[in-house]
Image: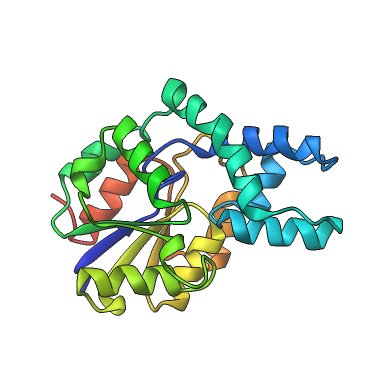
Amino acid sequence: MIDCIIFDCDGVLIDSEILSFAVDQQILAGYGINLQPDEIARDFGGISYGEMVSTLNERFDMALDAAHYQQQCEDILYDVFRRELRAIDGMANVLENLRVPVCVASGSDLDRLALCLGITQLENFFKNRVFSAQQVAKGKPAPDLFLFAAKQMGISPHHCLVIEDSPSGVVAANRAGMQAVGFLGGRHRQNADPALLHDAGACHVVASGDALLSCLRDMGLAR
């Protein structure tokens, strides 16, 4: 029985990842790291800046500072968001038709989440039920964030369903004892992603907001 739906934010509620990965590509090029947006999406989608920078430092024998890198990205990205950020098509309709409580659990920090949910006019669906990896010891793919969200909502992890667009998020949900629906409605998604989400452990994979609503109706979670 599902008593709560936990939404990832970037790439699920808001179509931000295609914008974020373009900024990452630009900044990483300045450090001599040449990665394409699809490579960044594949390797770093769904994880925190700290986890991303740790992996980059190991892979490329660098010594990037996570806080500095995050600030570089956000100095550019927030202006891009204010001009171009949109909610995922159909997501407001999904949220309006749910039968169970919802919250957000995201690798983004709380200030960014407040900005993005405000720009896309989704904040009223969640109010103070927005949780960030900055509130736990380890971000995705560790289960900490989803376990924290369930605790704050007062609901057993086994009674929570997660909506995620990244394999690391699906893995984190499963490690927390939660089912996960893989979501492919963002513009950054690639042809290989359905298989990656299935392999990560998603119980269903859907390609749009409308398909997500249909899936949740079939599960008895939406009108």
Q: Is residue 172 above or below residue 192?
A: below
Using the image as rendered, state which of residue 194 and residue 26 is in the foreground. 26
Where residue 40 appears, as percent x and y from the top left, is: 68, 46
Using the image as rendered, state which of residue 178 and residue 136 is in the foreground. 136
Which image quadrant is residue 117 in?
top left
Where residue 119 appears, as percent x and y from the top left, is: 33, 30
Q: Is residue 124 above or below residue 48?
A: above
Which residue corresponds to the image point at 15% horizontal and 46% vertical from the top-left?
97
Where residue 107 appears, as percent x and y from the top left, is: 48, 56
Where residue 182 appears, as percent x and y from the top left, is: 45, 56
Task: Tell whether 61 sits left or right of 98.
Answer: right
Using the image as rendered, state which of residue 76 and residue 151 is in the foreground. 76
Which residue corresponds to the image point at 19% horizontal and 74% vertical from the top-left?
154
Task: Tell whether 57 sits left or right of 132.
Answer: right
Q: Quadrant of the N terminus?
A: bottom left
Is residue 192 visible to us here?
Answer: no
Using the image as rendered, state which of residue 121 and residue 63 is in the foreground. 63
